Image: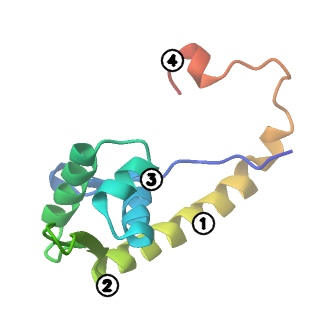
Amino acid sequence: MDAPGLKLRIDFAGGARIGPGKIDLLEAVARTGSITAAGRALGMSYRRAWLLLDALNRTFDTPVVATAAGGAGGGGAEVTPFGLELIAAYRALQADCAALAAARFGVYAARLAPDAPTTDALGGD
């Protein structure tokens, strides 16, 4: 039986937030060196990826992504040391929370009904 999972979103004052989508995007930029390639890898448009990264850059007093303009030499994007720190902090908290969720709710996972409805079928959680 799989341990129960969770999705983690951090809400900051003023409405800024970080969740799995933005962290996945940062990791994709770190892997690919490109906003376009990162967005493509995650099934999102360049515009959506750029808007999310721009929002992250404006959220903190230090940028999470640095970009270079395109052209003959090509452009690119790089996750800054602060961005890497943010990814690591989020992933560490995610692992801590997953372990706690498994400890507290693992016993209930074994008690799920075989035909239990999913949140997709009900439209909420």
Real-space CA distance between mark 4 and mark 3, rounded to the nearest whole angstrom: 20 Å
Q: Name which residue type carries label 1.
A: Ala
Q: Which numbered disc, 3 or 1, marks the residue that appears first in the sequence?
A: 3
Please give the label number shown on residue 20. Answer: 3
Real-space CA distance between mark 2 and mark 1, rounded to the nearest whole angstrom: 21 Å
Instruction: Please tell me how crowded label 4 is: few (under 14), some (14-19), or many (20+) other residues with Cα within 10 Å.
Output: few
Q: Which numbered disc, 4 or 2, marks the residue that appears first in the sequence?
A: 2
Which of these two is toward me, 51 or 31?
A: 31
Disc 4 + disc 1, Cβ < 8 Å:
no
Q: Position of residue 116 (x, y in %)?
A: 76, 20
Real-space CA distance between mark 4 and mark 2, rounded to the nearest whole angstrom: 39 Å
Horizontal placement of 65 versus 119: left or right?
left
Q: Secondary structure at mark 1?
A: helix
Quadrant of the image occupied by residue 109: top right
Q: Secondary structure at mark 3?
A: helix
Please give the label number shown on residue 95. Answer: 1
Q: Secondary structure at mark 4?
A: loop
Real-space CA distance between mark 3 and mark 1, rounded to the nearest whole angstrom: 12 Å
Horizontal placement of 82 versus 89: left or right?
left
- Please name the residue shown 57% across and 21% down the image: 120
Q: Name which residue type carries label 4.
A: Gly
- Please name the residue shown 16% across and 70% down the image: 72
Quadrant of the image occupied by residue 86: bottom left
Please give the label number shown on residue 123. Answer: 4
Q: Name which residue type carries label 2.
A: Pro
Instruction: Please tell me how crowded label 3 is: few (under 14), some (14-19), or many (20+) other residues with Cα within 10 Å.
Output: some
Numbered disc in front, either 2 or 3: 2
Which of these two is toward me, 104 or 118?
A: 118
